[in-house]
Image: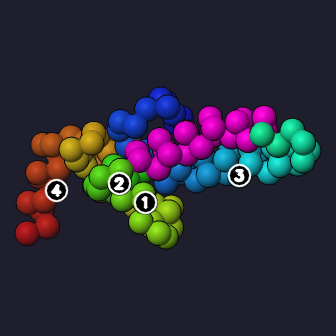
Amino acid sequence: MFKNVFSFKGRIRRMEYALTQIFYGICLYSIEAFSQPKGREFFSLLLLVPIYILIAQSAKRCHDRGSSAWFMLIPLNGLVLSFFPGEHGPNEYGDNPKGYGNDKEAFVNSEDSFR
C-alpha cells in the first residue's frame, strides 16, 4: 500500500484512494488552521505536494476502473472512484491490486465454469 505515490502508472484499490483523500483533507485543514492572512501565500505552496499526490492517486484509481486518467476531470467521478470496484483481472494499466484474476490460466478456467 502507498507504493510510488508520485507515479501516474499502475492501479490502486479503493482503500488507498480513500486514505489519500483523508490525508489531503487533513493537510488542507491543518495548513488553513496554521496560516495567517499575511503568510497565506507560503502555506498555499505547501499544498502543492498533497495536491500532486491526490492527482496521481486519482489517475491510478481511474486506471483500476479501466479508464484513462482524463476521466478524473468528469464532475462527481470521485464518487465513482470511491465506491465502485475496479476491473477484475489485469487490464492495459497493470495487474489487479487485489490479486484477483491476475493468473490468466485460473481466469480462463473460471470463465469456462460460468458457461
**Identity of the amino acid at label 2?**
Trp
Report the mark closest to the observer, 1 or 3: 1
**Identity of the amino acid at label 1?**
Leu
User: Circle 1 sits in a helix, a strand or a loop, which is it?
Assistant: helix
What residue did someone put label 2 on?
70
In 3D space, how far apart are the residues under numbered discs 3 and 4 (Cα atoms)? 41 Å
Q: Residue at image x 47%, y 50%?
A: 58
Which sits in the foreground, 106 or 28?
Answer: 28
Q: Which residues are magenta?
A: 42-60
What residue did someone put label 4 on?
110
Verify CB contact (< 8 Å) between mark 4 and mark 2: no
What residue did someone put label 1 on?
73
Report the mark closest to the observer, 4 or 2: 2
Q: Residues within 10 Å of mark 4 (few under 14, many from 20)?
A: few
Q: Up-down: is 79 above or below 72?
A: below
Of marks 3 and 2, which one's residue comes earlier in the chain?
Answer: 3
Q: Up-down: is 39 above or below 87?
A: above
Q: Main secondary structure of the magenta part?
A: helix
**Identity of the amino acid at label 3?**
Gly
